[in-house]
Amino acid sequence: LLEKLGLPWHILRLCGGDMSFTSAITFDFEVWSGAQKRWLEVSSVSNFETYQANRLKCRYRDADKKTRLCHTLNGSALALPRIMAALLENNQTPQGIVVPECLRRYTGFDIID
């Protein structure tokens, strides 16, 4: 999604101290904010392994017919207010704000002047 929107982005793997105690691994997607001169989180994806599945009693049978707990993933798409700010900041031109190509069929216009 971030590539299609043409935004400068990277993925940050969080260290153990920055994750919740239930998460086994977490990745944050960040976009560059020119106004704040720093990277801002716009999405987070976490693997909770069996923690949530245990509470849900969410199981499956493996090839040996043994019952196992599923691993669960949590992930948000994109935080809309931060994406809107990033789009406005990163697409400014002297003529106005250029709408990313992938959004033009929804907006019906190419530029906000």
Image (spheres, rainbow, N blue to C red):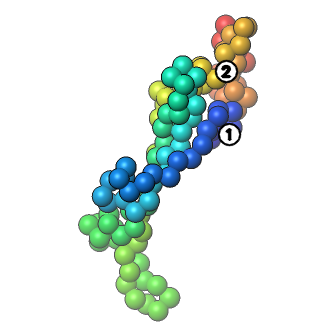
Quarter of the figure with residue 71:
bottom left
Q: Percent from the top left, x then y, of residue 8?
A: 64, 34
The kind of residue on which mark 1 rests is Glu
Q: Is residue 100 left or right of residue 67?
A: right
Q: Is residue 36 above or below residue 67?
A: above
21 and 50: which is toward the camera: 21
Measuring 57% from the left and 34% from the top, which residue is drawn there? 31
Quarter of the figure with residue 53:
bottom left
Q: Percent from the top left, x then y, of residue 110?
A: 72, 18
The dot on residue 91 is 2
| Crowd rating for badge 1 (residues with CA inside 10 Å; few <14, some 14–19, many 20+) | few
Quadrant including the N terminus: top right
97 and 25: which is toward the camera: 25
Q: Is residue 78 visible?
A: no
Q: Is residue 63 above or below residue 9?
A: below
Q: Is residue 96 left or right of residue 46?
A: right
Measuring 36% from the left and 70% from the top, which residue is drawn there? 50
Q: Is residue 75 above or below residue 82?
A: below
Q: Percent from the top left, x then y, of residue 49?
A: 40, 67
The dot on residue 14 is none
Q: Percent from the top left, x then y, of residue 102?
A: 70, 32
Measuring 26% from the left and 66% from the top, which residue is drawn there? 55
Quadrant including the C terminus: top right
The kind of residue on which mark 2 rests is Asn
3 and 101: which is toward the camera: 3
25 and 55: which is toward the camera: 25
Measuring 49% from the left and 29% from the top, which residue is drawn there? 82
Q: Of the residues under marks 1 and 2, which one precedes in the sequence?
A: 1
Q: Secondary structure at mark 2?
A: loop
- Please name the residue that numbered disc 1 is placed on: 3
CA distance for labels 1 and 2: 14 Å
